[in-house]
Image (spheres, grey):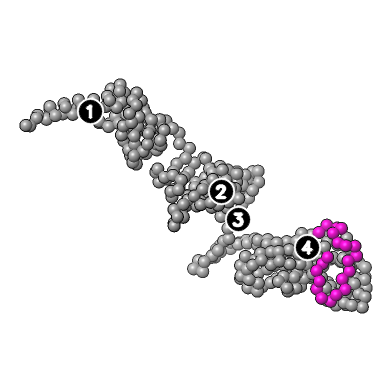
Amino acid sequence: MTYPDELLRLIDERADARIAAFAGGAAALTGATSGTINYRTGSTTCMVTLDGSALAVPVKVFGDVEVMEGDRVGLVRIGSEWTVVGTFTRRRSITMPDETKTGEQRMQWGADTPPELQSYGLTVAMIAFTLDSVTGLEVGYFFIAVSNIMDSPDSRSLVFGNVSYPTPGNPASATVSEVKTNFQMDMFAQFPNTIFKDHTVAFWTNAQFGLVNNSRLEVKAKLVTASQALVPGNFATNTGYTSGAYTNVVGIPTVTFVKGYDDTALDLQVHGAGYANVANVLTVGLAILINGVDYTCGVLAFNPANTHFPISGIGRVAGGVLPAGSYSGTALRVALLIGSGGGNTFTMDTNDLCSFRVREVPA
C-alpha cells in the first residue's frame, strides 16, 4: 500500500517531536538546552545527559568545540538532532591531536606546566611528548618555554629544551634535575646572547659552517676542572725544593678532570711564586702533570736572592694527544731546571699563592 507524501511527513514530524520531548523534556520546545558530557564517542559525537533527564543520549559536536567528560555544554536542536555548540568549561591548555592523553604522541600548549618545569622557572610552555618506539611508553618531552627568571631574578629568556623521565612511562618521576636546556635566547636589551647550555653542539661532516658580512664567532671554552688559588697559610712555612726533577707542589691538591672528546686539545695555565736562596743561579719551572707527563708552562730565572717573584705561564696539549676519558692525579709541579743541588733551594712560603687550570678546547 502506498501512502501520500504529506501523511509520511506528518508521521515523521510527530515521531521526531516525541523523541526530542523524551530526550530533552520541555527544552525540546525551545530548540536549545544544556547538559553534561558523559563521554566522547568520536571526533564529532558524544553521549550527553540533557538537563531534566537521567538518560544519556547520543548527540553531535561541532568540530571546533573541545569537550571532555564532565563538561557542562550548551546544545541546540538542528533538524531532529541535538548538537553541542559550546562548553561552559574554560580550557587552560590545548592538546593535539584531539583526544590524546598521557602515553600517546601529542603536543600540548597551556599555562599549567609540569612541576619540574615550574621548579626550573618555566611557567608557560609548548610541550611535545615522546614515546619509546619499541615499548610504546612515554619517555619524556621536548619544550619551548618562556622564563622571566632564567639565570637571575630578572632574566628573560626563550628556552628550548627537553626532559627525560628517569622511569619510562612515569611522568611523575621527573624532577628539576632532568630539565635540560638545549639552547636559550636571552632578551637582547638585557643579555644579547644565544646560549648553548646543557647540550654539546656538533656539526656533521656534511654540514657547512661559515661567517658572512665580517661576522664574529665567539666560542667560550668549557672549563673542565681547576684548582683555585690557595689562600696564605696553606703552605708549610719555608717549603724548599732542591730537585732538578719535577715534584708536586706541597699544599696544592691533585685533581681529576674528564676529557670529553678524542680530538680536542687542552689549554693549561699555571701561577706560582717563591724565592731563591742564592743570586744568579736558579731557573725554576712550573708544570702540570697529566697522565704521567709533565707539561712545562712557566719558567723564570731568579737573579736577586731572597726576593719573592711570581712564575706564570700557559701551555697546550695538542688535539688528539690525549683520548677522551677521566684523568686523575693531575697536579701542579715545580723543578729547579738550572742550579739544582749544591745547597741551592727554591722556597715557597705562606706569602706565596699557587693555582693551575686545565680546559678542554677545540683543537
The residue indicated by pointer 1 is 16
Q: Main secondary structure of the magenta part?
A: loop
In the image, residue 243 sits, relative to residue 232, either above or below, namely below
For the residue pair 122 and 303, the one nearer the viewer reads as 122
Kindly state the secondary structure of the residue where label 3 is placed: loop
The residue indicated by pointer 2 is 174
For the residue pair 282 and 34, the one nearer the viewer reads as 34
Q: Residues within 10 Å of mark 2 (few under 14, many from 20)?
A: many
Q: Is residue 363 visible?
A: no
Between the C-alphas of marks 2 and 4, the distance is 36 Å
Q: Is residue 129 left or right of residue 117?
A: left
Q: How far across and down, in percent of the image, does residue 242 sit?
A: 88, 73
The residue indicated by pointer 4 is 253
The residue indicated by pointer 3 is 197
Q: Is residue 68 visible?
A: yes
For the residue pair 171 and 321, the one nearer the viewer reads as 171
Q: Amino acid at mark 1?
A: Asp
Magenta highlight range: 230-250
Quarter of the rendering occupied by the N terminus: top left
Q: How far across and down, in percent of the image, does residue 123 sit?
A: 56, 42
